[in-house]
Amino acid sequence: MLVPQATKGDDSVTWIGQRSCRLFLVHLRRRRNMGELDRRSGIGFMRLAAVQRNAENQQQRSLQENWDQES
């Protein structure tokens, strides 16, 4: 597979070999994989924040119930 590439300085077209194309595709695949990791970690942080918020709310309710029972 050959891909045309314009060179700087002149209007001629040079050709990149298959190796360069493969390296480029590997780079794109890595970027996609990193994007998936970013999304997964973002979702994980959101879940963690929700769990923490629920735990804090539960603790606050328990403290309020104990306070109400003592009063």
Image: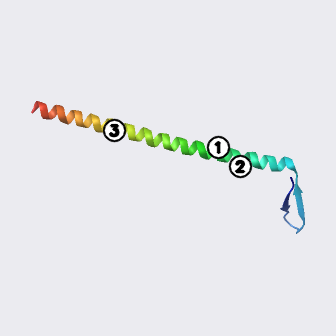
The tag on residue 48 is: none
User: What residue does disc 2 label?
Assistant: 28
Q: Which class describes the residues within 10 Å of circle 2: few (<14), some (14-19), or many (20+)?
A: few
Name which residue lies at 11% across and 30% down. 70
Q: Amino acid at mark 2?
A: Leu
Distance from the alpha carbon under mark 2 to that under mark 1: 9 Å
User: What residue does disc 1 label?
Assistant: 33
Which secondary structure, mark 3? helix
Q: Position of residue 40 (x, y in %)?
A: 54, 42
* Left or right of 7, for residue 27: left
Q: Amino acid at mark 3?
A: Asn
* Left or right of 17, for residue 44: left
Q: Amino acid at mark 1?
A: Asn
First of labels 3, 1 by sequence position: 1
Q: Position of residue 14 (x, y in %)?
A: 89, 60
The tag on residue 54 is: 3
